[in-house]
Image (cartoon, rainbow, N blue to C red):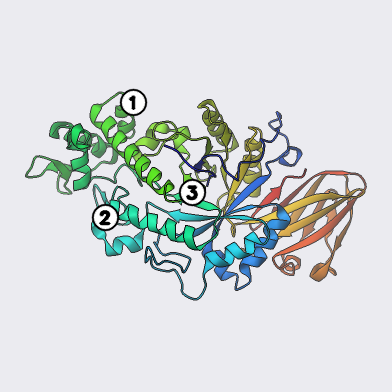
Amino acid sequence: MKLLPWVFATALLCGASALVSCSNSSSSNDDTADANNSTTPKEVGTYLWGATVYDMGLDGAKRLAEAYAKTGINNVILLVKGESGTIGYFQNSLSKAPKARTDRDMLAEVLDAMHAKNIKVYAWLIVGVDEAYIAKHPEQAAYHFRRGYSESSMDISQTDYQKYLANIIKEIDQNYDVDGFALDHVRYQGAYFGWGESDFKRLTASEKDGGLGLTLKEYNELVTIMAQEYGYPTSKNESGRLVYDEKAESPEIQEGILESSFDNGNKAVKAFGSMREKITDDISEYLVKQTNKPVYIASMPECSSAPTYATLNYGLTFNKAYTFDVVCPMLYSVDFEQDSAWVSKNIEYLDKLGYEKIVPSLQAFENGSTETLTEDINASIKHNIPAYLLFRTGTYDIAKAERKEGNTVELTYVRSSEFPSGDITVTTTGGKPTEVIMSGKLEKTKATINGKKITFNTEALKEMADYGTITIKADGEISYVFVESDKTIVYNVPMN
């Protein structure tokens, strides 16, 4: 399947694009090297919720664009259709999709502000979850084996829903100057979804009729294995088909039995995986064809770290359902209870599969920290990546240190729009700070210098508004600046 440019984050998978048009960066061979001592990608992207911009007020998009431009973020993935199914733009004559709000067109605002600063904007659409659509078309929802039809997860094989999504892409393409699209949740939401009547028919129809050709006995074997995985009680209905039955005896849970059955070549489980891969492949290819602009497809990290799990739970894998020129895994290390070594291993796995360009999406949101984000960036940079992505604006602050004439560093600090920055600590490597100069509202604020550490308290930073610039003079050249907050994650832009 052909995928068009760029990549997007929950992971992004894409073809050759604007984001990765720069040449690969050189990397450090030292595992402990500071990220700021490595040559870094020219392209950095951030995810952005329309609600974040809205809550910042009428000038929010302009203020963000100015902050991004000062700190080197040059790609924005703007959420314009979330899990609720509402859209963040006005021109909806084709889809008639419900609007998130009627007072401000967030897509138009962000495009105007970002393009004025030469920052690209990609329209981010949630595909596999749509509460508003299901409210009107409950029969097109995904069928959960135990709970029945979902109130939020879509059956992405439904052609009416696929056409609805196609119209959303077309109307954005026709009415807004977006630089591309980012399609998220183009997948099943778990192995327990996809057990409705249409799924049964697809699995048991003959191959000649487009099915997988399972007999009723083989289908029931598949249900038995899946039920053992999750402990679902089952019984046969009037047609002899195994279905959920809360009154029946629950089987003993056997975690991993679905994956082991797949890996051991069980016909029914293999058919189950193949069906899901084909559906995700078909909808992705269909949606990509609706525009000539770059389209990113988001993917989960298990696609590289646990491909069998990804096949059965998502129907989306790197090496079975698709072919790509570029792949961008969602490597949210802390949420997956992993570390930067895991980030590195995922990139290495994809590299061995033959992907020439790999762009990781990294955890810059709650549960993570300044340290884990820095470690993940550093681990990624070692692999000659052309770019990386941060999830998401509003959950991290930005610190950019630039060397000036003499032993001077100019530090730009961008505050988060949603959380207080807290107390800030600046640690230098190399020269020892001798003087801190602050201008504007910070002019009368005194920073505390203790050796190679400089601290700023919360009250001072409240005066900083969206961003502020601080000049640090030292008794020798400062080779590295690391900024931390006790309240929020700080993205330290690597020094060149």
Q: Nearer the viewer, residue 397 or 76?
A: 76
- The residue tagged 2 is 140
Residue 292 image label: 3
User: Mark 3 and 1 residues: CB-CB less than 8 Å, in contact?
Assistant: no
Query: Which is more N-terminal, label 1 or label 3?
Result: 1
Quadrant in the picture for residue 430: top right
Secondary element under disc 2, as helix, strand or loop, is: helix
Quadrant containing the N terminus in the rendered view: top left
Q: Label 2: how many residues lie within 10 Å, few (<14), some (14-19) or many (20+)? A: many
- The residue tagged 1 is 263
56 over 289 or under it: above or below: below
- Examine the rendering and report whether any part of residue 314 can be seen: no
Q: Amino acid at mark 1?
A: Asp
Q: Amino acid at mark 2?
A: Gln
Q: Measure how far apart labels 3 and 1 are at the Cα level.
A: 38 Å
The reply, left or right, for residue 91 in relation to residue 25 is left
User: Mark 1 and 2 residues: CB-CB less than 8 Å, in contact?
Assistant: no
- Examine the rendering and report whether any part of residue 22 can be seen: yes
